[in-house]
Image: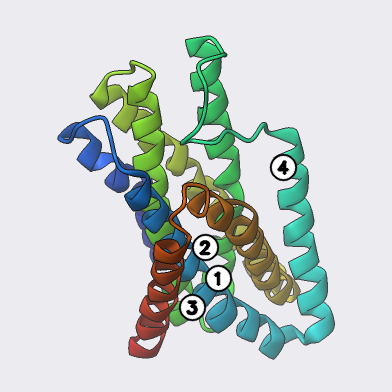
């Protein structure tokens, strides 16, 4: 229990950690660096899905279980995306009123963090929790850091104070603590759900990678640099997987 709580807190608060530089830097960041951060995060999540979540689901549940769980993860993320308006952090125009725009971005990021928290909790409930749980928590945390930075950057560009933007970015990730504990308890009570949960987490992460992170990292003419960052992210996560 202490391990899942620590992992979920660290992964969730990584959103705030990523927003820390916003307190000290200028209000601008080149598109190249934004794209590199997004692509690096995508590589980390890809390796975590393919090297940890999917093999563990196959091992404990088989291909049919993997297919059902992964499809469920993709379906939930699809429904979530259809319900919550997608906001391009880098290209949003000033057509909305400030309060409405700020609330939209906060709601969108918070809701998109829900399946990430579930992924962490489910991973800790697996038989290999000491390894896979820590790896997935790390992967989600590393993905949350640039996300928190970009959210805080967006907010200060909407004339929100730096400290307030930092606190809001941190709170958007805090919801992962609740969903992580929920995922852990459900899969602990019903052990048969563990392989489905792992596959669900993989499906959710793969959806985020291909639908959100990769397209947004290729939108400003930095495709080649982003591709390199994606590969480095994969290698970085594989190195961590082999080291722990």
Marks 2 and 1 close (CB-CB < 8 Å): yes
Q: Residues within 10 Å of mark 2 (few under 14, many from 20)?
A: many
SS type, badge 4: helix
> Is residue 159 in view?
yes
Image quarter for residue 50? bottom right
The residue indicated by pointer 4 is: 80
The residue indicated by pointer 3 is: 132
Q: Gap in Å between the C-alphas at discs 2 and 1?
A: 5 Å
Q: Position of residue 92 (x, y in %)?
A: 52, 27
Q: Residues within 10 Å of mark 4 (few under 14, many from 20)?
A: some
Marks 3 and 2 close (CB-CB < 8 Å): no
Q: Gap in Å between the C-alphas at discs 3 and 2?
A: 9 Å
SS type, badge 3: helix
Q: Gap in Å between the C-alphas at discs 4 and 2?
A: 19 Å
The reply, left or right, for residue 34 in relation to residue 115 is left
Closer to the camera in the image, 193 or 237: 237
Instruction: Name the quadrant of the N terminus.
Output: bottom left
């Amino acid at each position: 229990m202490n391990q899942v709580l620590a992992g979920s807190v660290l992964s969730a608060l990584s959103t705030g950690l990523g927003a820390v530089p916003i307190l000290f830097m200028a209000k601008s960041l080149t598109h190249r660096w934004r794209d590199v951060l997004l692509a690096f995060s995508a590589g980390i999540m890809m390796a975590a899905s393919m090297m940890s979540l999917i093999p563990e689901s196959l091992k404990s549940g088989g291909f049919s279980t993997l297919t059902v769980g992964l499809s469920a993860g993709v379906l939930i993320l699809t429904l979530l995306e259809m319900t919550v308006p997608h906001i391009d952090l880098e290209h949003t125009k000033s057509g909305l009123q400030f309060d409405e725009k700020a609330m939209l971005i906060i709601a969108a990021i918070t809701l998109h963090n829900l399946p990430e928290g579930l992924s962490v909790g489910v991973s800790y409930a697996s038989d290999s929790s000491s390894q896979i749980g820590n790896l997935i928590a790390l992967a989600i945390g590393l993905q949350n850091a640039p996300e928190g930075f970009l959210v805080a950057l967006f907010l200060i560009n909407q004339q929100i104070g730096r400290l307030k933007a930092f606190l809001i970015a941190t709170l958007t990730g805090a919801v992962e603590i609740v969903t992580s504990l929920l995922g852990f308890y459900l899969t602990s009570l019903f052990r048969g759900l563990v392989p489905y949960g792992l596959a669900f987490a993989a499906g959710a992460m793969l959806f985020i990678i291909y639908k959100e992170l990769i397209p947004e990292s290729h939108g400003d003419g930095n495709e080649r640099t982003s591709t390199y960052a994606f590969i480095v992210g994969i290698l970085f996560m594989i190195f961590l997987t082999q080291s722990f």
